Structure formats: structure tokens, C-alpha cells
Image (cartoon, rainbow, N blue to C red):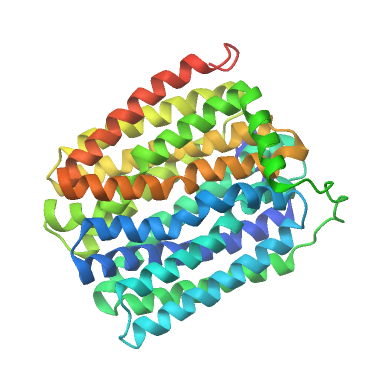
Amino acid sequence: MERSRARAFGSLRSRNVRLFLAGQAVSLVGTWVQQVAMGWLAYRLTGSPLLLGVLAAAGQLPSLLLMPIAGSLSDRWSRHRILIVTQSLAMALTLCLAGLALAGVVTVWHLVAIGALLGVVGALDVPVRQAFVADMVASRDDVGNAVALHASVTNAARLVGPSIGGAIVAHAGEGVCFLVNGASYAAVVLALLAMRTAPEAPARPATPILQGLRETARYARSTRPIAATLLLVALVTLLGRPYTVLLPVFAAEVLHGGPQTLGWLMAASGCGALVGTLALSLQRSLGQSARTIRLGAAVAGTALVLFALSDALWQSLALMFVTGLGVMVHLASSNALIQTLVADDERGRVMGLYTMAFVGLAPVGTLLAGTLAASLGAARMVLLGGLCCLAGSLAFGRRLPRRLA
């Protein structure tokens, strides 16, 4: 029991990890509060599933273009300082959105424009934050545990935030949600400022950005487990995870609910994700990570197929729980496997590829989901995505070396 507890929380020996996770816990609750508010406000203003896809794509499209570059920059500059700047910028943009909403002048195009600017900031922030997790731990053996705990905090916030967001929207309006998120960024900025950072290593020799990207792509292709993992993450991002932008449609048209129903669906997904990542914190071997990457995609795909066929609230909530568990087990295991295998001097750039696969490709997936949902229906789109996740999980196992499969 004691050994399991030590393994589950080993990375918390680092003061910086404790500060980082505490700040993230507060800030990410605010992020999910805002996520519910933006989706509901956009659907209330337009009534269009296609506009939900456009809004999500506006926030995610910069990631497709900028994340590999951001990963390269994070190998040259202080990741700690980059995060302070990006979190401060995100706070300022969110408070601007809160002001527009509280003044009663917000339009869907305000949401799209500010969402796009937040996407630019996020494109710089996310790969740096992923690589920074490994910088904080005392031992390389703790990297997987730190990744799992970070994912657990993310999903605890995902569990709490949507329910809070749905309640705030119902009783106080979307503008208050944006204000709450803007204030929550202060927690992570203060945590970063309180960290004791080690002297910076000599900067990596400056390489032209395009040349660096080509070198990183060659490195990833030559490392078979990394290449296979990136491909499956990309598939799940394109065809599986876009179910989230269609949840307002399911809440309103399939389950005949309102913003609180949407919050419950998102919270159920977050609860499943939290359970999955807490279980992953006990993992020890790379082989376990590789197997859970494949298992997570298969579980998520199966749950999405069944969710697409459900019209009962309790059944849909249960399937959202299983979907969230599967998706996050898949993503957290993928992150841990890549961070453990990658060379230290390639970490930032390879994590740039990883974050491009799980965030940068998301706008393509959300636009596809919105377009197909408008023509085929939301349920058929989710059904198709689930079947593709199942097929991808089978193909993934065949591409791994035998020692990991």
C-alpha cells in the first residue's frame, strides 16, 4: 500500500510540481467554466451546429500552424518565462470578453475573434507547458507520474468546471463565467512566480525553424513507437474527440435539456477522464503505456458508438463517463510514452508535434464534425467517429515493436 501511494504521488516531492499543479487546478476550473459558456452562448445566438464547429476551429486553428514552431522555441528560451507571458496574455483576453458580455454587446463574431486570439496564445503555451512538466521533476523516473498527475488535475477541473459553468450560465449569465475564468489565471501566474527555477542550460544552437522542423519530423519517423503514437493521437483528434463541440446539440435536441444538461454531460466525461488518469499514475512500464494507448482509443470508440444511439439522459451520462475515461487514458499514456522515450534535447520540438496532433489538428476535426452534423445529423457524425477510433486502435498495435505491444 505504501509503495503504491509513493508511486502514485512520487513527483510531488518537487516543490515546483506542487506549485504548478495547485495553480493549474484553479486556472483549469475557470477554463472549463468558460468552455461551457462559450459553447452555450454561441448556440443561443445562432442555433447552428456549424457555427459551433467554426467557433471551436477559430480557437484551435492557430495551434495547427504555430505549435511545432512553439516547440522549437521552447528548446531555445526559458520555458518558465514563456509560461508567465502566455498566461498573463490569456488573462487579459478573457477579461476583455467578460467586459463585452457583461455590457450586453457581445456577438458571435466577438467570440470567434477572441477565441482565435486565445488560440494563438494557447499554441505557444501548450507545448511549452507539456515540456515544462518534465523540467520540474527531480528524476526522469518521475516523468510519467508527473504527466499523469497533471492530467488528473486537468480532468478534476473538467469534472468540476462544467457543472459550475452550467449553473452560472443558468443563474447569472455567460459574462460572469468569463469573469471567473479571467480571475482564475492569477493563480497560475502567482504559482509560476513563486517557483525556484534552476540556472538555465546553454541555449540550443540556433537552427532555421524550417530546418529544425524537418529534423524533428525525421527523428519522430525514425522512432517507431513515437511515430505510431503520434498517428493514433492524430486520428482520435480528427474523428473521435470532436464529439465535445456537438454536445450542445445532444443536450438540446436529443435529451431535450438546457445549459445544465450540457454541464452534466461535460462533467460526466470529465469524471471518467479523472478516474482514468488517477489509475495511470500507478503505471510503471513503457509496455503498460503502449497497451493503454490502444485500449483507451478502443474504449472511447465503443462508448461513442453507443452514445450516438442513446436518447436517455442516464445512459448518455454513463457513456460520456466511459468516453472521457477512454480518451484521457489514450492521451495521457501517449504523452507519458513519448516524454519517456524522447531525447532531452528533442523534447520541446517533439512535444510540439504531439500537441499539434492532439490540439493543432482539432480545428480540422471540429470543422468536419460541424459540417457533417449539419448535413447528416450529430448522432451519425459521432457514430462515424467512434468506429474510426476502434479501427485505429487495431492498426496501432500492429505498428509497435513486440517489446511494447
Res. 12 in view: no
Indicate left or right for 262 with 359 as reference. left
Q: Residue at x 41, y 80 (%)?
A: 98
Q: Position of residue 52 (x, y in %)?
A: 29, 59
Which residue is nearer to you in this view: 36 or 313? 36
Q: Residue at x 50, y 75 (%)?
A: 93
Res. 196 in view: yes
Indicate left or right for 286 with 159 as reference. right
Q: Residue at x 44, y 71 (%)?
A: 114
How many labels, in total? 0
Which residue is nearer to you in this view: 88 or 12? 88
Q: Quadrant of the N terminus?
A: top right
Q: Position of residue 275 (x, y in %)?
A: 43, 42
Indicate whether 3 appears above or below 134: above
Indicate left or right for 358 with 351 as reference. left
Q: Position of residue 90 (x, y in %)?
A: 54, 69
Which residue is nearer to you in this view: 381 or 167? 381
- Quadrant of the image occupied by residue 157: bottom left
Q: Position of residue 233 (x, y in %)?
A: 47, 35
**Furthest residue to the bottom?**
103
Indicate whether 105 appears above or below 65: below
Indicate whether 76 appears above or below 167: above
Indicate left or right for 317 with 206 as reference. left
